[in-house]
Image (cartoon, rainbow, N blue to C red):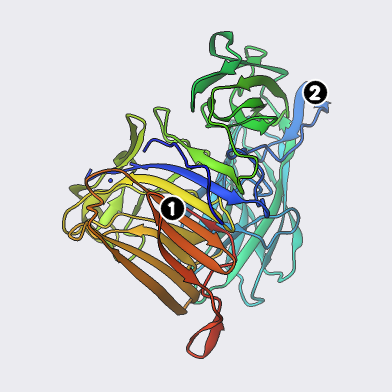
Amino acid sequence: MGLSRKMTSKALALTLVLLMSVGMLLSSPPVHIRAAGITFNLDYESQSDMDDGYVQRELIRNGGFEEGLAHWTGVMGIYEVSTEAYSGEHALSVGGDRDTGVEQPITDLLPNTEYTLTFWAKVDDAHDDLTWIGVKNYGGLWDASENIRSTEYQQYTVTFTTGPENTTATVFVWKSGQPGSRKCYVDDFSLIGPTSGIPVSEIIVTGANGVTEISEMNGILQMEAEVLPADATNKSVTWSVEEGSGSATINSDGLLTAISNGTVTVKATAQDGSGVEGSCVITISGQEEIDPNDPWVIVFRDEFNGTEIDSSKWNVEDVPSPRNNEMQWYKPDDVYIEDGNLVLRSQERENTYSGGTLKYTSGSVTTQNKFHLRYGKVEVRAKLPTGRGIWPAIWLNGVRSWPPEFDILEVLGQEPNVLHTNNHWGVWPDVGQVGGDIIGLIDYSQDFHVYGFEWDPGEIRWYVDGELVRTYTNDGKLFKNGKPFDAISNEDMYL
């Protein structure tokens, strides 16, 4: 399947610097995600009941994990979004051989007030009694929690009363580490109760200075939201864009980027749980015309036009040596936007943690729990660093686990003219690899190049600057320790 429309993205930029811009396209059919960008809408409804002058509303954000891990903070260990859901498409999964958990802060509670938290949960092993879910930091002497032991989804209820001066609390999921891969699945958190906050009643959405159109190629427009009343407690909004006859993407700061001509509807949704939305129609012109026969539909794009990383699309890693016994700590300050490029920087600087001392830092970003695809095409325009010990890589990783992995590109800093393309398959520990090294005259560190990867059910293909450089066809099962596996992944993957 060919791609007739090339991406005109700027640059995914390592400093040793990897400069990069990303375009992801998905074949149609199937259109796995129908969007010109990623939109996140709150999955709770407002409560209009009033009690003694206070608003009754849902206080948990993204309690069903349909927005991935948005609004939840990982504490440590292995936590991810799973398709093993009680309702909807997603649930939280925690487990592994290390302690792990997630939590979410709750604000605007009333002191000396009783609240009830409900959720659905199960474990995959009846002997697993090491998961606790509940509420802490609410003013009580002990955490209010339930121990999860059921192997079938069961609804749990946790009741707590805030302290005399407490207006906040923390909802948590905690699982102690143990050998093996025992997991706990959690879904549909709900905490409806009175809040001291003043709710949002109206949102007025406009383009900056009243502008309602974009006419420049890949042009941008800063959207603005006036939240009323002016003294609303939480005036934060979530931005999203809906396709009309045109398409665009919008980041978490409301920066709209044009993709194709026509109209789009930009929405701002109140984050206070009121459910209030505001919208504005933006007209887009001057974009490259899309061939109606083009089999590709853009579902994710980032030109890095803003000043900060778009947190609705990217996770910036802050973790020591998470893979391959690497010698660096991934640090957020080694990830930044500069001149329309994403820059991932490597530096020589020591950091000490419980596992030892690492002499280097570097940058890493992922779309885990924010964007994934199953079959399609990825294009990345990147300039790679050189130097022994440097290992720039861009790859797709399985949402469920590792493997699968598709290496779109890997280059060793001391061999800047050798492009490594690998396909990792199997189920741990029975894993295998099909690799291919592209040895050419190009020094990939000297300039930007467009690296493309196409993924079909029976075939995967690699491109450099639009030229096909490698094809792998799945001619049947591959075996590891006598077990058959598909060599080409058929499950969701993230960048």
Residue 398 percent location from the top left of the image: 52, 62
In this view, 480 is above or below 449: below
Q: Name the spot of residue 59 as percent of width and height, x first.
A: 68, 37
- CA gap between label 1 and label 2 equals 60 Å
Q: Where is residue 117 drawn, in percent x and y? A: 71, 47
Please rate how many residues cluster around mark 1, counting C-alpha atoms within 10 Å: few if below 14, some from 14 to 19, many from 20: many
Using the rendered view, name the quadrant where residue 46 is placed.
top right
Mark 1: amino acid? Gly
Q: Quadrant of the N terminus?
A: bottom right
230 or 266: nearer the viewer? 266
Furthest-bottom residue in this view: 482
- For this rendering, which residue is in front, 114 or 331? 331
Name, please, the residue furthest toward the top. 209
Compared with 94, 136 (above or below) is above
How many numbered marks are there?
A: 2
User: What kind of residue is marked 2?
Assistant: Asp
Residue at 41% from the left image edge and 74% from the top image edge: 434
Residue 114, picture quadrant: top right
Q: Nearer the viewer, residue 250 or 20?
A: 20
Q: Which residue is mark 1?
A: 452
Q: Residues within 10 Å of mark 2 (few under 14, many from 20)?
A: few
Q: Quarter of the image holding residue 286?
A: top right
Relative side of 204 to 415, left or right = right
**In the rendered image, is residue 109 in sight?**
no
- What label does residue 52 carry, if any? 2
In this rendering, the answer to whether 443 lies above or below 460 is: above
Q: Going 29% across and 59% down the picture, which residue do you hit?
A: 354
Apparent side of residue 421 relative to residue 165 in the rendered image (left or right): left
What SS does tag 1 mark? Answer: strand
